[in-house]
Structures are given as structure tokens and as C-alpha cells.
Image (cartoon, rainbow, N blue to C red):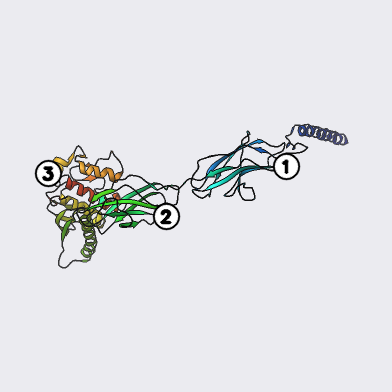
Amino acid sequence: MDSLRRNMITLLTAFCLMMYSCSKADAGNSAETPEEPAGNIAVPQLGTLAFSEITTTGAHAIGHILNNGGGFVLERGVCWSKEEMPTVDGDHREATSAKGSGEFGLQLTGLVPSTSYYVRAYAKNKGGVAYGDQVVLRTADIQSVDFASTPLFIIGSSRASYDVEIVGSGGGAITERGICWGTAENPTVADHKVAHGSTGVGKFRANLTGLTERTNYHLRAYAVNETGVSYGANVPFRTIGKGNVTYTFNKVSNPNAEQLAAYERLQVAIDSAVWYANNYTSATKHVWLNYDAGVPTADANNEGWMRFGANASYQNIRTMLHEMNHTFGTGTTSWWSNQAISGGKYQLAQVNTVLKWITADNNAVLNGDGMHWWPYGLNQNSEVTSSWDFVYNCLIIEAMRRDGMTSHSGSYQP
């Protein structure tokens, strides 16, 4: 037993000596932080600053350290001022990275438009702070706002809507934007204007109301930045004639609870559908609205007779406008079957032009069959994403009237 214990102690001692020897050898190969050279350290030397991407509020600055002065560079960056010879005691920004060649870059921000600044590169080491040559940076002037050219296609009898797109702020802050209009070309905000609630660049839809039917107007988008008011292109348009769609709602003398509930829903639907038709089409039509529990969904003919069944999911504005379209002549007239639809596509120009504007797709063509059309034909509840779909439906109906659908909704008068 004693012999075994002595052997184990001997082995452990040898193992520890071996580990100590290996540790010393490894330590000799480990990386060490280089020491700064001894002796006097001079301040760094810097090249001349260069600028790119100069805007109204900033620029990208590129500097170079030509010589580190014999010591480690502890900080490098740019300082600036409206007064000459800026220092790090004033406005300055440190560069967070640098290339091995000594080049470093950083972004100057928060400057004032149309203003000259004195700028110097700087670098620090143990020898002190060094500065490069002073350079003058002048920020860009704020320009007028830039607008995209967009068509005006949402036109009713007393209202219109225009989709504005501001693609550039001119380098300033847009504090107000909207549209202005009048009966003379190139209207200004001193005529009539409607301001949109948001600011900045981007797209927005502005709505005009209180217009006069069958009247020529002009509108322009506008935006306000530090330079004043900028205007988009002059857009002429003409309001359509106000529609004259009326109705008779046939009801039983003593309705039961189910009929009363249906009448209430259908009353909202017919009043809303007539409002859209009278404001966004120039059609003249009288329709007869009927509740018939035996009708599976809803139906209509080109004489103006409409029937709605007991299914409440069809007793809404979407279905009412859809059935009203049939009374105007879609899917119910020889014009529809002989001229408008062929090979599953709508063949006439006015509708397809309007559809291209609505969808912003220059290849868009209206689809159709023997009875229905799409998109915006309001064939299913799922097709409605907002009340604008009701407007688009009426715009297409009005375009169909210009294409010749006149015999069942009054003759078209521009």
C-alpha cells in the first residue's frame, strides 16, 4: 500500500512539473499589446479635408492623418464654426473608425441651409491636439418643392379629388401641403385652397367640395417650405352634370319584425347608393326597390326594377350599387353584349382609360362576362376595402356612359 502511494505522488509531481513547463512556453508565444515608442512624441500631421454629399443641413467629410507624430492617435475628427479657426472646444464630431492609410470619414449634420462654415480636421495623441488646414463649407440653398405629375380622374358634379405626390422637399421642411383651385389657369393659395392634415414628402389625396356642375376648373398642388409656396403643374378639369337617380321603395302596409329590419337596412343602402350615383355619375334613372324574401340574393333589370331577398348580408350599399349598375345597362342591354364585352374584356376606350388611372397600371383592362364586370363591379362584399370603391364604381359607370351606355340612364351630356 505504501509503495502504491509513493508511486502516485511521484506521477502527480511529474505531471505538475510538465504543466508548469508548458505554461511558460505558451506564455512566450501569446500576443501582447504593443507599447508606445519612448521619447518625444510630436502632434499628428493632417491633410486637407474634402466634402461630398453636401445638403442644406450637412455634408460627408473625409480627412487624412499623414503622420501620427510618433505616437498613437487617440482621437480624430472634425470641428466647425461660423467663426474662423474652430477648435475642439466648440462644435466637433469624432470619427468612430479609420482606415490603415489614415483616412477617416464622418457625417456632419444639424447645419443651417445657405450658410458658410469654417471646418478643420483634428487629431489627438500624447503630444497634443493638431489641426489641419481650415476649409470653408457652404451648405446648399433650399429649393422649391418638387411634385410628380399625376392624372386627375376622381371628378363628380360638385366634388373632385386629386392624388398629390411630393417627390422632393427642396432640402427644407414642408410645413403645409394641399391643393388650390379656381376657374382661371394657374390658381394660387390666394384663390381657394384645401390644406392636407399631414406634412413632408410623399403621397396624399386632397378633396374639393362645393364645386358647380358642368364647370371648367383648374387646380394645382402646393407645398410650403422655407422658400415660400411651391406649386405643381396646372391641371384643368370639368365637373360632370349632377345625376338624377330617384327611387320608389315599395313596402307592405303592415310589415312584420323581419320586414321592418330589412326595410331599415335597405333604406340606408338605397339612400347611400343614390348619393354616390348622383354625385359621381350624371345618370338619370328612376328605380323601384322591393323586398322579396323569396329572392335568394338580389336582382335587377334595365327597366329599374330591383329586388332584395331575406339574406341580410346583401342588404347593403355594395349590393345596392351593383344592382343599380344593372338598371343602368351593365349586363342587361344589347349594348353590353354586342359592343362593350368581347372575349372576356371590355372593348371601349373611356372605361379602360379610367381603370388605368385608378389602378396606376398602364396595362389594366376591365374584365367582363354576360352579366358582370370587375374590378370595382362590386360583385362580392369582399371586394370592398373602403368607401372609395363605391366612388370608383361610379366613375367607371360614368365612363361607360361616355362609351355609349345611354339608352337606360339618360343621354350623356358633357
Q: Position of residue 209 (x, y in %)?
A: 27, 58
Asked whether, in this view, residue 340 is left or right of residue 79, the answer is left
Above-or-below relation of 164 to 50: below
Asked whether, in this view, residue 22 is left or right of residue 202, the answer is right
Amino acid type indicated by mark 3: Ser
What residue do we see at 51% from left, 50% from top? 112
Q: Position of residue 43 (x, y in %)?
A: 70, 40
The residue positioned farthest toward the right in the image shown: 2
Asked if residue 289 shows in the view, the reply is no
Q: Residues within 10 Å of mark 2 (few under 14, many from 20)?
A: few
Amino acid type indicated by mark 2: Thr
Q: Position of residue 160 (x, y in %)?
A: 27, 53
Q: Position of residue 172 (x, y in %)?
A: 45, 50
Of residue 348 and residue 101, the one placed in the foreground of this image is 101
Of marks 2 and 3, which one's residue comes earlier in the chain?
2
Disc number at residue 127? 1
Of residue 219 and residue 130, the one placed in the foreground of this image is 130
In front: mark 2 or mark 3? 2
Q: Which residue is mark 3?
A: 334
